[in-house]
Image (cartoon, rainbow, N blue to C red):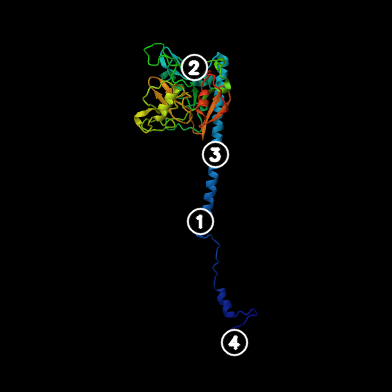
Amino acid sequence: MSLRTSFQDGTDSGCKSALRGRSFLRVRAAFTLVELLVVIAIIGILVGLLLPAVQAAREAARRMQCSNNLKQMGLAMHNYESAFKRLPSGNMVGASFTVGLSVHSRLLPMMEQSAAYKMVNFNFAYNHVNNDAARLQRISTFMCPSDNFSQLPTTLGGPNSYYANSGTNILAGSPPTSSSDPNFGMPECNGLFYRDSKVRMADILDGLSNTFAFSERVGGDGNNGISTPISDTFQPGTNPANADEARRDCMNVNVADLSRQGYSNVGAPWLQAYHSTTLYYHVLPPNTRSCMFPPGRIATTAGSRHTGGVMASVADGSVQFVSSSIDLTIWRALGTRASGEVVTEF
């Protein structure tokens, strides 16, 4: 008889003992390198598809907030006119200063900003020490969330995204009375806000729904050693006599030539009445260029970081989005208060 005992299942006793003394290694399931790479690629594609949608949703929310800000400014303008029987001056100067205080400063009480309004001393210039507290205030209603003011020196004061419409005539204020002045004989601003303006709603003969009150402008880079065409105010060095000449000279200026830099602290402070802080013109189409010419001739224009156009407050209190490709004739018509132009849909 064999020394090995045979089991019924056919396994002899020696093999059985050997199997009992061994431990089996279990094979665990895992991703291969190729599978991992495929998964990563799929995740990348999904993120690439979702990211633009998320960014678009965020921009839509920012644009809505921007629209609400302009709506508040438009309503404040109407409340001011109702109380004082005229719109606030675009640049009211005083006996002791020549650089006036902005439209924005006078609208504050109509925008639930009475505390900031009480800080403003209208007997002094915007940069006087008596107005430091007001000048440094950051008013959220004056700031479009799509804009970026991080490059501006904080010492300038509170930033501003929304500019008051001065019209299509390029003179910065009222025409001089002295025949020796180089600006003698030039036409007065034909918008709603300018130096010592006292426009009433009844003076807007083109119709409230056909005249703009406020629009956006992009915050500057705060450095004349850098050229940023979307925000900087350039100096072509010419003396244009009208809007067409100003547009031509502004578009022909070499923006890469830093000697043509005019003003880069665009957008602050909101307290200052100035063409690069609170006033704009309907000379060039939106999102093009802004220029300043000696002596006191201006062609700063509307602009924004919204895709394809700018938000604008209409004199009737509504807010519209205006395409950057708007016809220049229509854009200029929207900037005048009583020029008799026919405005089609925009």
- Which image quarter holds the C terminus? top right
Closer to the chain start, of discs 4 and 1, is: 4
The residues bearing labels 4 and 3 have C-alpha atoms spaced at a distance of 85 Å
Check whether the beta carbons of the residues at disc 4 and disc 2 lie within 8 A of each other: no
For marks 3 and 1, give the one nearer the viewer.
3
> Which amino acid is tagged 4?
Ser
Residue at 53% over, 42% down? 52
For marks 4 and 3, give the one nearer the viewer.
3
7 lies above or below 96: below
Q: Position of residue 9 (x, y in %)?
A: 64, 78
Residue 248 visible (yes or no): yes
Q: Position of residue 102 (x, y in %)?
A: 47, 20
For marks 4 and 2, give the one nearer the viewer.
2
- Dot 4 falls on a residue whose secondary structure is loop
Closer to the chain start, of discs 4 and 2, is: 4
Q: Residues within 10 Å of mark 1 (few under 14, many from 20)?
A: few
Q: Which residue is mark 3?
A: 56
Closer to the chain start, of discs 1 and 2, is: 1
Location of residue 243 (image quadrant): top left
Q: Which mark is residue 282?
A: none
- Dot 1 falls on a residue whose secondary structure is helix
Q: Which residue is mark 1?
A: 37
> Which amino acid is tagged 1?
Leu
The residues bearing labels 3 and 1 have C-alpha atoms spaced at a distance of 29 Å
Closer to the chain start, of discs 3 and 1, is: 1
Q: Is residue 63 left or right of residue 183?
A: right
Q: Which residue is mark 2?
A: 89
Q: Position of residue 322 (x, y in %)?
A: 54, 30
**Viewer-side residue, 28 vs 53:** 53
Check whether the beta carbons of the residues at disc 3 and disc 1 lie within 8 A of each other: no
Q: Position of residue 305 (x, y in %)?
A: 49, 33
Q: Residues within 10 Å of mark 4 (few under 14, many from 20)?
A: few
